[in-house]
Image (cartoon, rainbow, N blue to C red):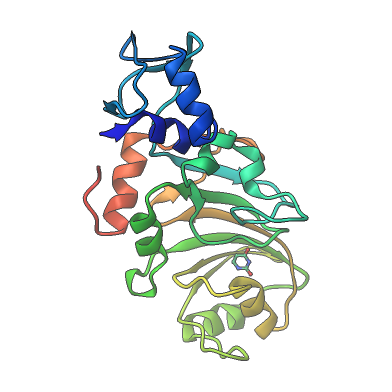
């Protein structure tokens, strides 16, 4: 339950005084009934309308986004476009945030959620959530590279944990890592003398990028996908 004025502010409808005015004018219905008291306590799952138009009042969202190259993974940035520009404004207003980061030039699966605890747990190093990437590199991958990845690579400031490298084509590898340090995958390839030309994330924990989702598009998670991700985080699904 939430005060009606607070609910509308959280949804990004306007400032507190703006939404209070709208409510007093009778522009808002909850459950089909006009509510003119800004302090009325409301069930935030109830159907909501503003000026007779339905308004999506949900405060929880879980999104799969097919990230294109060229966007920053950030909640906002003063100069550059971010992945949040691909979603309706209300999603940022209710605190739907990317879980982890992909580099600006990396494409593929990005998961965003309003559940801060889920976000935090999925990124926790103790949780060992697998992330799978397809990498195009500028050299020929060899069994020695596979062995080096499995052994754990020494990078400039840390030792990467053992990772799986599957050679898909002479210059293409599928890597599974459990960590998510800055430029992790690019730096691992660099440690075996290869430069990553293109990087694409295929999966994050049990979540796989939907092959029917074009680059730049997003959709909400299915109940099954959500349940599996909560299980990855060792949390009860809501
Ligand atoms: N590793 C990288 O180097 N870049 C990414 O975007 C993700 C993982």
Quarter occupied by residue 170:
bottom right
Viewer-closest of 2 and 48: 2
The residue drawn where x is 34% and y is 58% is 117
Q: Position of residue 158 (x, y in %)?
A: 54, 89
Foreground residue, 184 or 2? 2
**Number of residue marks:** 0
| Residue in view at x 43 percent, y 18 percent | 24
**Is residue 179 found left or right of 39 in the rendered image?**
right
Compared with residue 54, is residue 71 higher up or lower down, i.e. above or below? below
- In screen coordinates, is 117 left or right of 195? left
Of residues 209 and 151, the one drawn nearer to the viewer in this rendering: 209
Q: Where does residue 168 sit, x and y in percent of width and height?
A: 61, 60
Q: Nearer the viewer, residue 97 or 196?
A: 97
Instruction: Identify the residue at the far left of this view.
Output: 236
| Any part of residue 218 in sight | no
- Say whether residue 90 is left or right of residue 57: right
Q: Is residue 154 above or below residue 95?
A: below
Indicate whether 70 appears above or below 86. Answer: below
- The quadrant of the picture occupied by the N terminus is top left
Name which residue lies at 63% across and 91% down.
156
Q: Residue 70: x and y, percent?
A: 75, 52
Instruction: Give the residue displayed 67% in from the left and 58% down from the top.
Output: 106
Q: Position of residue 132 (x, y in %)?
A: 51, 60
Tell me if residue 77 can be seen.
yes
Residue 85 occupies which quadrant of the picture?
top right
Viewport quadrant of the C terminus: top left
Looking at the image, in which quadrant does ligand 1 appear?
Answer: bottom right
């Amino acid at each position: 339950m939430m005060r009606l004025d607070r609910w509308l502010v959280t949804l990004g409808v306007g400032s507190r005084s703006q939404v209070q005015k709208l409510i007093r004018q009778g522009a808002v219905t909850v459950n089909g009934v006009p509510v003119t008291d800004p302090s009325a306590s409301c069930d935030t799952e109830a159907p909501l309308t503003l000026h007779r138009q339905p308004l999506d009042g949900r405060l929880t969202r879980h999104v799969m986004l097919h990230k294109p190259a060229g966007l920053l993974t950030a909640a906002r940035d003063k100069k550059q476009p971010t992945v949040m520009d691909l979603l309706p404004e209300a999603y940022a207003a209710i605190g739907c945030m990317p879980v982890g980061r992909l580099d600006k030039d990396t494409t593929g699966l990005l998961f965003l959620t309003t559940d801060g605890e889920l976000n935090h747990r999925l990124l926790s190093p103790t949780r060992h959530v697998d992330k799978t990437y397809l990498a195009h590199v500028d050299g020929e991958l060899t069994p020695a590279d596979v062995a080096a990845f499995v052994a754990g690579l020494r990078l400039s400031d840390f030792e990467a944990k053992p990772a799986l490298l599957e050679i898909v084509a002479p210059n293409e590898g599928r890597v599974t890592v459990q960590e998510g340090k800055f430029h992790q995958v690019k730096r691992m390839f660099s440690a075996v003398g290869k430069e990553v030309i293109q990087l694409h994330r295929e999966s994050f924990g049990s979540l796989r990028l939907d092959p029917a989702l074009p680059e730049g598009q997003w959709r909400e998670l299915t109940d099954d996908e959500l349940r599996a991700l909560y299980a990855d985080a060792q949390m009860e699904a809501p």
